[in-house]
Amino acid sequence: MYAVKGVPVSGAPFLFRQLLPGILLYCCAAQAAVAGNCAAEHTSERVRVIHVYDGDTVKLGDGRRLRFIGINTPETGHHGQATQPYANEAKARLQELLDTHNRTLLLQAGKEHRDRYERLLAHAFLENGDNVAVRLLQKGLATTLVVPPNTWGHTCYQQHENVARSARRGIWGLDTYKPQQSQSLPPNTRGFRIIHGKVQEVRKSPHNVWVNLEGTLVIRISKKDIVNFESGFVESLAGHHIETRGWVKPVKNGLQMNVRHPAALATIARPGNTH
């Protein structure tokens, strides 16, 4: 027998008993919606933003630079480099969110507090609880990015990216962000790419695991990061078609992509599958 606040349902009025399933369904749906918005587990700091560098990096009132965990937005041009498509839109969207929420953020710190550039690393939330990363992912202005040990929320973030990607919002309408076949990559390919290809070989060296795809692209997984993968997973990829994502760069014998977390590797049912 079910009870609400100690009152048995059988003793409740008939109308209440009729409405109870709907009430319970509403409550469950509301909880799912909160979970789907990648709500904070806790926040440790309240900060004020005084400058927006781009869609994922800001300057705080005390002078610290903050880099959002979980996403990467297109780069604005600096040091002679061109501004990437949708970089200005991502920056403007972040600026808009901040301007309408008192330029204030609530932070959930990562396990690793700073990156190699000494930027503060944290998940950022608006005063109303909205996750900034989610708001940018929903508009197609960011990709997910998982950098261990800061892996909190990556599955939730990926769900929002998948929706924007399926709808071809923002960056997902660009050819650069569409999956490319590994055997067709030009030798000068550089930058973020989503790659489809068949794994030709998985081999080990003293410090790395190498996943060779058709063509000249090789995926490098450092031995220190192999602990992030289930035992035997990387070896099991041999002969399978996979989707991998990350930054491609030319090297001496072809192209290389460094992967640190299984979120960047997935088997696909057939070549050309784009979810």
Image: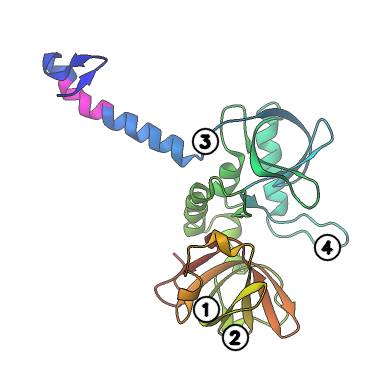
Reply above or below: 73 against 220. Answer: above
Q: Amino acid at mark 1?
A: Gly
Residue designated by label 2: 215
Q: How many numbered marks, from 0 up?
A: 4
Q: For residue 69, which numbered disc appears in the image?
A: none
Measure how far apart labels 3 and 4 are at the Cα level: 35 Å
Magenta stretch bounds? 17-23
Q: Is residue 57 left or right of residue 221?
A: right
Specify the farthest residue to the front: 206
Measure how far apart labels 1 and 4 are at the Cα level: 30 Å
Residue designated by label 3: 39
Q: Residues within 10 Å of mark 2 (few under 14, many from 20)?
A: some
Is residue 20 a member of the stretch shown in magenta?
yes
Chain-order first, disc 1 or disc 2: 1
Q: Residues within 10 Å of mark 3 (few under 14, many from 20)?
A: some
Reply above or below: 7 against 242. Answer: above
**Are circles 3 and 1 on residues that touch, CB within 8 Å?**
no
Q: Residue 173 appears at what percent x and percent y?
A: 57, 62
Chain-order first, disc 1 or disc 4: 4
Is residue 5 a member of the stretch shown in magenta?
no
Residue 133 image-quadrant placement: top right
**Are circles 1 and 2 on residues that touch, CB within 8 Å?**
yes
Measure how far apart labels 1 and 2 are at the Cα level: 9 Å
Residue designated by label 1: 197
Residue designated by label 4: 81
Q: What type of secondary structure mainly makes up the magenta span?
A: helix
Measure how far apart labels 3 and 2 are at the Cα level: 41 Å
**Are circles 1 and 4 on residues that touch, CB within 8 Å?**
no
Residue drawn at (71%, 86%), measured in percent from left and top? 253
Q: Quadrant of the N terminus?
A: top left
